[in-house]
Image: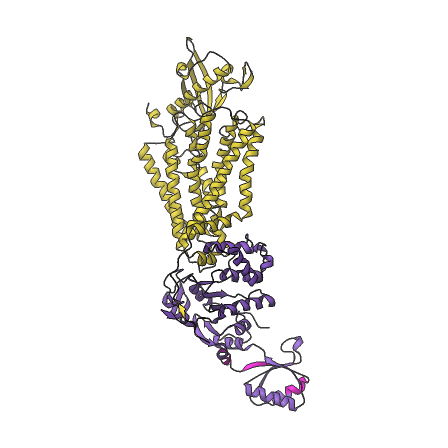
Amino acid sequence: MTAIQLEVPPPVRPVALRRSYRFELVKLASQWRLRLVLLACLVAPAVYTAVISRQSSLPADALYGRWMNQSGWAGSLVVLVFVGTIVLPLLTCLVAGDVFAVEDRTGTWRQLLVAVRSPRRIFLSKALAALTVTLALLAALAVSSTAGGLVSIGSHPLPGLDGHVMGTGELTVKVLLAWASVVPPTLAFSAIGLLGSVALGRSPLGLLMPVVLALLLEGVQLMPVPVALRVVLPVHAFTTYRGLLTTPGQLGPLWIGLAVSLAWTALATLLAYRLFVRRDFTNLAHDGSGHRFVVAGLAPLVGLVAVTTVGVGVGTGATGTGIERPELEAALATSFAHLYVLQTDELHRPAVTEEQLHTRARCDKGGDLVDDTGPGADWRCVVTWTLPGATATGTAIYQLEVAADGRYVADGDGPKEVNGFFRINTPTGDAPNPLWQFDGVVDLLDNETKGS
Amino acid sequence: MQSTAAIRARGVSKTFGDVVALDGVDLDVPAGQIHGLVGPNGAGKTTLLGLLLGLAVADGGTLEILGMPVGRVLGVPGSVAGFVEGPGLYPTLTARQNLAALASLRGTTSGRAAHVDELLDRVGLREVAGEPVRGFSLGMRQRLGLAAALLWEPRLLVLDEPANGLDPAGKRQVHRVLTDLAEAGATVILSSHRMDDLAALCDEVTLLATGRVVFSGPVRKLAAESGDLDHRLVTSDPEGAREVADGTPSLSRVAGGGSLSRADDDALVVRGPQTALDELVVRLVAAGIAIRELGPVVPLLESAFLALTGADDGVTPDGESAR
């Protein structure tokens, strides 16, 4: 055999990031499962809002659910509630939670490594591709739910969570910002998905990690935990858009949620990256390690929770559950004043302003034997106001159900003419009584009101 | 710098925990050669293939691939391609999409589609190019894996069991691709349990056992290591042949009359050096007994494999009992 002379080959260069990123997108787009999910995200919210908005029974338990037949914007905000509770963590499971594990299932790691020649590029490509697809799904949900509501009911005003009426312009901006506010926590759960997918491989727990974590943290959120802990959990960041729906906005939890979400995103991504680049790809039987996940994945995240909890506690001075009588009274009085003005307008009574009403609220939780603090369905409040030129003081009673996350539902208990009946007789016909039942939100980090 | 060795390994070792996968492996593979890698399960073949593809680095020793020292993971030259433990394809993509996606990684935009189709044609998959890979048989996957490796225009092609699941036509097609590559100057490392494939394709083979090289050289030299082989003899007169065999010097009768299978009731199995077999043939002819078949029970390479690896008689390289 004739000897063949070899030229020494040039140094190895990894594939460009944009090429490997496109490669990952092609693979994700080829999964019929993801195609179906995208279709569902495009269709289901629109159908839901269109159908539910026209029913007499509305999902009043969800924020703005009782307004779905009044304004098309309410449907988008109701879908946002469901999205933040379970849908987005579930979507991150399907995309980020599977983006590494799928290579284990198909036995394609070696092919990919030999082709791309850089575990770092592979990681970045997969993370970026998963992020792209997740954000596309989120955008589909937002567009679909908003379009469904607006087409079905139309763009009508909607009261904010402090009772002030938001017009189309304000609603457009705030609904858009509300959807944008769930992007950071979605990134955090995507990063958790990457971590689970890298650390646990084909294990179902790796795939379901974002949902498992979300359900766990939702459970924590239901309990009256200290507010400093509550606001540093990434699942809380799915609800901080509520602060945008008041004037002035309750932006403290929103900024903290943003910072916490980005911290979770950065740490979980870094942990996933470290686990990935240290992996032995010659081991075909690799299926992750629960022990390694706990030590190298879970423990640092628990540490992050501890550090940020202390940081928020010290930085804001927030103690307890964040639900105290003074701030609840302030929130209720503000909402009542705004909604009274709305009711006055609908009834075509002489115009009145919030300032002229001098509204006050006095609240009590569970009688004298119970401290007036914390969540519960046993809050009872008396709202008083004064009409211009009148000597008598108006009085209305509300039963409040206050959730641990600061949202409350005020249920009118009379008098009938003010808040005791669900409809009012306006000159143009019957209309929903805005003072009968309404949603509000307590600023959990509002220390000024607490101290007043 | 120029070299004639596509692979040059000296004292290469690799351990996984307490398990020694490779123990001081020396290997020289000239460029343009089809080189077989054979050994029983756990011999270290996959580990060695992984090192050649850059999926791992050796713990000790030196490894040069295409004249370039390899010192880090994925540090092998870009013109090394292949697959180990399965071709690694994406089941949701079609055959063409698999190749096109891989081609786009490389970034060769000019004539990419035509090149992909040409490769599919070369491995005999053009007609199923639009089918999702999830429906492919093992043999089709193997051929597509080969096409994927060819995308990189390799100067060193590393293949692990490329003939698995191939029908005779597919096997011929793969063999033709590999011999064409070698003729064009590329080096092919071929791991296989199928001795007939290795014998048909390889210039040289390396035999690994428990992480060590027990033989490396030309196929014919390996065959010589096989010692006395068992031969199967079928004649027109089994009784007469048995008597002749018993009377032939240096020849022993291993089995006869129903020892192999029902179809082999009339066959004898005899063992001895080539000279004794020649003498047996002469005596049978002299006795007027027609010889219908005389050949090794186990192929030459397989016998050598069994002899060199110390495997039990009747056990094939892949660990299954020989029929």
| Residue A194 seen | yes
What is the quadrant of the N terminus of chain B in the image? bottom left
User: B236 and B158: which one is in front?
Assistant: B158
Q: Is residue A258 left or right of residue A285?
A: left
On screen, residue B182 above or below B133: below
User: A226 and A209: which one is in front?
Assistant: A209
Judge whether residue B227 is colored magenta: yes
Judge whether residue B278 is colored magenta: no
Question: Quick one: which residue is furthest to the left in this view?
Answer: A314
On screen, residue A19 above or below A226: below
Q: Residue A45 in the image: x percent, y percent?
A: 54, 35
What is the quadrant of the C terminus of chain B in the image? bottom right
Q: Is residue A65 left or right of residue A312?
A: right
Q: Is residue B254 left or right of residue A361?
A: right
Q: Which chain is purple?
A: B
**Which segment did they paint magenta?**
B222-242
Q: Is residue A149 left or right of residue A222?
A: right
Q: Residue at x 40, y 43 (%)?
A: A265
Q: Residue at x 38, y 39 (%)?
A: A260
Q: Colour of chain A?
A: yellow
Q: Quadrant of residue B94?
A: bottom right
Q: Residue A307 in the image: x percent, y percent?
A: 33, 41
Q: Quadrant of residue A393?
A: top left
Report the number of numbered marks. 0
